Amino acid sequence: MENVILVTGGAGFIGSNFILHRMERDPDSIVNLDKLTYAGNLRSLEAIAHDQRYEFVRGDIADRELVRSLLDRRRPRAVVHFAAESHVDRSIRGPDDFIHTNIDGTFALLEEVRAYWGNLDRQEQAAFRFLHVSTDEVFGSLGPGDPAFSETTPYAPNSPYAASKAASDHLVRAYHHTYGLPVLTTNCSNNYGPLQFPEKLIPLMILNAREGKPLPVYGDGQNVRDWLYVEDHCEAIAIVLATGVSGETYNIGGWNEKRNIEIVEIVCDLVDEIAGRRGKSRRDLITFVKDRPGHDRRYAMNASKIERELGWRPRETFESGIRKTVRWYLENDSWVRDVTSGTYRQWIETQYSS
Ligand code: NAD
Ligand code: DAU
């Protein structure tokens, strides 16, 4: 076993932030296996592309031969599994890719990792970790007065995306219970920050606000999400990987519940402040549109286990994190132009045409 971590989905939003974060702080080498779907972007990793400790491999986690040869060649001490189809609205319009990657892909990866791990010596087996990155959406929807999700909240996924992630969580759990594979699962709330594909609420609103386009808020805008700055999530994953107890799950959250409309208003005010106002406030661009089918009303995370047992708490406040994020999108126009060409325009056209 080498000092290598195999990261899947490392060209996506959280995966690329994680790789940049780890390469700066850790001597381990990183192999990034990513299919480069519409959501994967190698520009995000330009800063480390030529680092000798980094290797990029383009491929599908469901390609078992590829995964097998990669594990044999690089002999990682851990796998951090981000690769997924991640956008709820896309899962509603077409769930197939979600089943392929999130369920079949995770299954294929687990099978190959189980075989690889089975051939390690005892000491290496004990040290090995498979960290599965999951979401709070597997727990379903909360009412206004309900307690936040904890690690023991029963699963009740509502969208095809959430159901596919729930299925993958169950597979990971079963591989620990049945085969003894040393797994860790993290369930995290909504991330925001640099390098997020602008189909998701915050970057979509920043870019539309900058361009004076309508800001499409689903339903009545009162749906609540818990928001966490992406770097805090990356740090939490690193801590779970280093010190988490095999077989355990850890909730990760920002202790920061906000209604969607509040988020959009904050974004409008920051774009007004940073990019300058052209007369009217950008809040005037807010447009209430048809609701997302089956739209979960509220998510909230109780992240006290990871704080109590592993000593992690978010560092960033929402006020500082959202300011950094808005500034980043306004200052990184060439990254934005790169990811918003072609297929992105097509998606926006389909999703918001009516
Ligand atoms: P993303 O959509 O930005 O990136 C996904 C990455 O996976 C892309 O680079 C894509 O090319 C790659 N990928 C997709 N299918 C693949 C396949 N079959 N084989 C190899 N690579 C493939 O997603 P994200 O927002 O960075 O989320 C990463 C993980 O974190 C996901 O598992 C997601 O469920 C989970 N998560 C996300 C959030 C959030 O707020 N974004 C919150 C909690 C958990
Ligand atoms: O909770 C964690 C999850 O957060 C992750 O597992 C998912 O991968 C990630 O995409 C995110 O899911 P959401 O559905 O919460 O994120 P999204 O940014 O799509 O939407 C956030 C909220 O904003 C949600 O209530 C829907 C609403 N929304 C979204 C868009 C894109 C709008 O009102 N208008 C929009 O145009």
Image: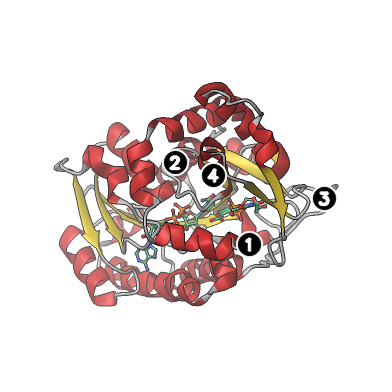
The answer to whether mark 1 and mark 4 are in CB contact below 8 A is: no
What residue appears at the point 47 percent right and 45 percent down from the top-left corner?
A: 240
Query: Foreground residue, 191 or 278?
Result: 278
Q: Classify mark 2: helix, strand or loop.
A: helix
The percent coordinates of residue 127 (x first, y second) are 34, 52
Q: Out of 303 and 242, give the one closest to the viewer.
A: 303
The circle on residue 146 is: 3
Ligand 2 within 8 Å, label 3 CB: no
Q: Which residue is mark 4?
A: 191
Q: Earlier in the sequence, mark 4 or mark 3?
A: 3
Q: Dot 3: within a 10 Å radius of its alpha carbon, few (fewer than 14), some, or many (20 or more) residues?
A: few
Please report the residue visible at 34 percent of the width from the left and 52 percent of the height from the top: 10
**Label at residue 138:** 1
Q: Is mark 4 within 8 Å of ligand 1?
A: yes
Pointer 3 or 1: first along the chain: 1
Disc 1 within 8 angstroms of ligand 2 (CB): no
